[in-house]
Image (cartoon, rainbow, N blue to C red):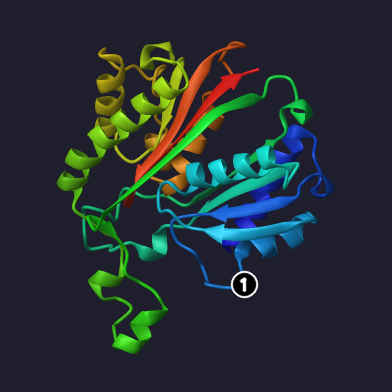
Amino acid sequence: LMAEIAVDAALKAMAQDGKTGADIDAVICSSANMQRAYPAMAIEIQQALGTSGWGYDMNVACSSATFAIQLAVDAVRGGSARAVLVVNPEITSPHLAWKDRDCHFIFGDVCTAVLLERLEDAPEGSFEVLGTKLLSTFSNNIRNNAGFMSRAEDRDPEDRDQLFRQEGRKVFKEVCPLAAEHIANHLESLGYTPTQMRRYWLHQANLAMNQLIVKKLINAEVTPDTAPLILDEFANTSSAGSIIAFHKYRADLAKGDVGVICSFGAGYSVGSVVVRKR
């Protein structure tokens, strides 16, 4: 099922860029939960799309999309691929604890796809990746312990510990300053200040988190134009959320405008991608 929705999203992304499977050298399938351990879903997606080269799966929870984008950028810049397709199939429903109000109502199922290629091959109006930056530091405050090892422990699949669990207040308190500092450091390394950013496309988990993070960065009130929200329509879609926000709220940027795509989540993990409209 995850491969099927990934293929659908990938075909739409490829159509926007006028690309076929023959133009793509790699597929990275990154999401918070994998439907199976192997074979990699990316290889199934690769076959369905008719792409050449290679593919693999990766998981960094809600930061999976931005982490995969950095790997794709590195592959293109390093010359191992002309174009890399990053897909983020997020089917969150099966790992939710429906009796726990801290998690069951805040998630949605969706898939996004992003195509990264050499700048000279990209069409007018696309976005140039100016830089990527990743960070991870261990915390058990967001976790999902489900996996094949549970069979050896005689666990009930419905055991609360086998489903999504989070310590919401701790996450809010610890992740907001972590994400704000990460973005500020990233922008400084590229010669930018936070107030120079036209837009922030942040991880879509919590409105208050996003507003607090951006307010720390720009020291001003945060508007939907500065940091758009898609939670009201899609809910929390894990790693796909910041990409949905980017997809829906990028067309109005002028040539030369710069913005930040940033996701954060379990790990803790934070990934940021600074982009400029061409």
Q: Nearer the viewer, residue 245 or 136?
A: 136
Residue shown at the point (24%, 31%) measured from the top left = 208
Residue shown at the point (46%, 26%) measured from the top left = 260
Q: Nearer the viewer, residue 205 or 234?
A: 205
- Above/below status of 221 relative to 187: above
Total numbered labels? 1
Quadrant location of the N terminus in the rendered image: bottom right
| Quadrant position of residue 48 | bottom right
Question: How far from the left and from the top, in percent, is residue 122?
Answer: 74, 28
Question: How far from the left and from the top, in percent, is residue 251?
Answer: 59, 20
Quadrant location of the C terminus in the rendered image: top right
- Above/below status of 146 relative to 63: below
**Can residue 129 be spotted in the picture?**
yes
SS for dot 1: loop
- Above/below status of 68 relative to 178: below
Residue shown at the point (41%, 28%) measured from the top left = 186
Mark 1, Cα crowd under 10 Å, few <14 / some 14-19 / many 20+, is few
**Can residue 12 be spotted in the picture?**
no
Q: Is residue 149 left or right of residue 78?
A: left
Residue shown at the point (61%, 42%) measured from the top left = 74
Question: How far from the left and from the top, in percent, is residue 104?
Answer: 29, 56
Q: Amino acid at mark 1?
A: Pro
Reading the image, the residue beneath label 1 is: 39
- Above/below status of 128 relative to 141: above
Residue pushed farthest right? 22
Q: Nearer the viewer, residue 104 or 237?
A: 237
Question: How far from the left and from the top, in percent, is residue 120?
Answer: 77, 26
| Quadrant position of residue 196 | top left
| Quadrant position of residue 203 | top left
